[in-house]
Image (cartoon, rainbow, N blue to C red):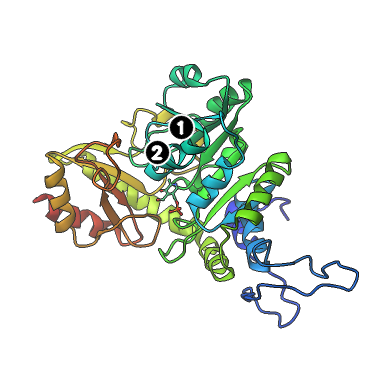
Amino acid sequence: MKKTFEFETRAIQSTHFKDKNAGAVTPPIYLSTTFERNTDGTYPHDYVYSRMGNPNRQLLEKSIVILENGGVALAFSSGMAATTALFQTLKSGDHVLMPDDAYYSSLVLAVDLFGKWGLEMTKVDMSDLTAVEKAIQKNTKIVWLETPSNPQLKISDIAEISKLAHQNGAICAVDNTWATPVFQRPLDLGADVVMHSSTKYFGGHSDVLGGALVLKEASDLTENLRQIQHLAGSVPSPFECWLTLRGIKTLSVRVERQTQNALQLATFLKNHPKIEAVHYPGLDSHPQFEIAKKQMIGGFGAMVSVQPIGDAQHAMAITGKLKLFTTATSLGGVESLIEHRKSIEGETSLTPDNLLRISVGLEHVEDLISDWQQALGQ
Ligand SMILES: Cc1ncc(COP(=O)(O)O)c(C=O)c1O
């Protein structure tokens, strides 16, 4: 018998729960907000009050630790709540270095919300190591990566940037939402913190919001984050934890098939005469293909961005012609979604006018390709 199981086995095992009451194979949902206390002041099961902890959340956190090869995980009510908690560990005058292409709200959060509390933020092209090195400041405390990035699928070198961050006394945090731990494990590459919007591939069915932070081991930072989780209280409900755990059971099969579909769709679009550019790190034409190959494990994810030849209006008209791609924000569910990003991002967005972001789903890939064929008019 092997000593360490493969990822798929670990993922399923991580969701197991020993139900002493009924022997249930799937975990019950513990709705109780409060838990009994002993007369000596201790708690027989270590649960006190559900903002502080609950069996469903504990199981979810244990599972995410296993998926990311971490030591400690903290579950939050959304990806943004997880990012907020990490930024709340900083103090006024600290600096965060962020990518010039990243989930738009993460960038806005750093400026609009944390700017008022004295956090400094600058953006840099994280695919350019020299630029990253120059942009790190004396007061930089977090180098924030998102790779592949949203929505231009730029790739940044997690191992090299983590080294740069450490040389300068900062930590490297990676938003691993798009790659998922099936294809990328930043803690193994030297990063200090992994952030997830579990709303996306972990949940996998577009029906639950959630977020998580994962760290290598218990430390002052994990203690600080645990305190923020408990006091600020942006925690997921027991049902949300349960739904996310259910999603995790099928995470690898879903994202592997979605990724196969994405590669085929990206290849079709790249060769189409009405397409100006396709952004997908699994294409050998991608500028950081070699870095993606080095740090991603067996796949490049199921997100593809495409620029049809023409202006923003033309791109938006295409979304109306597609029958299998629902025009909606978000990603990572079993159904294919498409979105014109610039019109949803704000004025400072650097996203090209004609860029459409596609979350490739689990429909048959030939149907997806033929839908694009008819929408592009050939
Ligand atoms: C890469 C990335 N990070 C973070 C988030 C935010 O997650 P949530 O919506 O769960 O707060 C999103 C949401 O779209 C995302 O795409």
Residue drawn at 44 percent across, 19 percent down: 131
Amino acid on which disc 2 is placed: Ala
Amino acid on which disc 1 is placed: Met
The number of discs equals 2
Direction from residue 128 to residue 40 in the image, left or right = right
Q: CA distance from mark 1 to mark 2?
A: 8 Å
Q: Would you say the residues marked 1 and 2 are in contact, meaning their CB atoms lie under 8 Å apart?
A: yes
Please give the residue where the numbered disc 1 appears in the rendered image: 98
- The residue furthest right is 40
Please give the residue where the numbered disc 2 appears in the rendered image: 102
- Residue 56 shows in the view: yes
Dot label at residue 20: none
The N terminus lies in quadrant: bottom right
Percent of width and height locating residue 351: 28, 37
Percent of width and height locating residue 275: 17, 40
When asked about the image quadrant of residue 159, the answer is top right
Where is 42 relative to 101, above or below?
below
Direction from residue 33 to residue 253 in the image, left or right = left
* Crowding near the residue tagged with mark 2, few <14, some 14–19, many ≥20 C-alpha atoms within 10 Å: many
Q: In front here: 221 or 101? A: 221
Q: In front here: 252 or 325? A: 325
* Crowding near the residue tagged with mark 1, few <14, some 14–19, many ≥20 C-alpha atoms within 10 Å: many
Residue drawn at 16 percent across, 57 percent down: 320
Percent of width and height locating residue 352: 24, 36
- Residue 146 shows in the view: no
The secondary element bearing badge 2 is classed as loop
- The residue furthest front is 116
Decide if ligand 1 comes within 8 Å of the CB at mark 2. Answer: yes
Percent of width and height locating residue 233: 60, 58
The secondary element bearing badge 1 is classed as strand
When asked about the image quadrant of residue 192, the answer is top right
Direction from residue 304 to residue 320 in the image, left or right = left
